[in-house]
């Protein structure tokens, strides 16, 4: 789960995670904070590794006490062919997201990316969640190559 106030910008090469591909966004990311009072501040490397990429907002001193979410999760959704029909490759990549507060889902939904046209068909209205989804997808597609 990534912190909902984290705005990832570029991959971190050579982080200290034992299994970077298992991170919530598919690898480690550097970026900046969007929490009130810390907008556009870049956390130190140890904070990025311990909190932004992995942590619940409740464990970060920069996160506001009153917040809608503590963390955001992502997952790829496999496209299922209609029963009895021949499976055909789809250019639409579906991503499930769950925004959590106190370890419980408070918002969930699906985002869609058209890989053939290289554009988002269904986006998230929150720029942070959308950017995290883009990073997640980029990491997952790269790991398939």
Image (cartoon, rainbow, N blue to C red):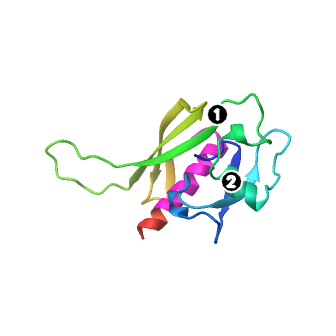
Residue occupying the point 65% across, 60% down? 29
Residue displayed at 71% across by 30% down:
67
Q: Residue at x 39, y 52 (%)?
A: 92
Task: Quarter of the image for the C terminus: give it.
Answer: bottom left
The residue stretch that appears in magenta: 123-140
Q: Position of residue 114 (x, y in %)?
A: 44, 54
Of all residues shown, which one is farthest toward the left? 84
Q: Horizontal placement of 37 versus 5: left or right?
A: right
Residue for badge 1: 69
Mostly what secondary structure, the magenta segment?
helix
Q: CA distance from mark 1 to mark 2?
A: 18 Å
Decide if residue 122 is in sight here. no
Helix, strand or loop at mark 1 = loop
Q: Is residue 36 above or below residue 75?
A: above
Magenta stretch: includes residue 31: no
Q: Residue 40 placed where, x, y %? A: 81, 51
- Compared with 21, 125 (above or below) is above
Residue denoted by label 2: 50
């Amino acid at each position: 789960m990534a912190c909902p106030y984290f705005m990832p910008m570029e991959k971190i090469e050579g982080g200290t995670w034992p299994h970077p591909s298992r991170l919530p966004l598919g690898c480690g990311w550097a970026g900046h904070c969007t929490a009130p009072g810390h907008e556009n501040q870049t956390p130190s490397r140890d904070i990025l590794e311990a909190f932004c990429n992995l942590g619940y907002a409740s464990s970060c001193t920069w996160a506001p006490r009153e917040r809608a979410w503590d963390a955001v999760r992502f997952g790829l959704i496999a496209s299922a062919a209609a029963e009895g029909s021949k499976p055909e490759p789809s250019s639409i990549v579906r991503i499930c997201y769950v925004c959590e507060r106190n370890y419980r889902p408070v918002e969930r939904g699906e985002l869609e990316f058209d890989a053939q046209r290289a554009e988002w068909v269904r986006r998230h209205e929150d720029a942070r969640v959308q950017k995290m989804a883009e990073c997640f997808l980029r990491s997952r597609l790269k790991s398939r190559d």
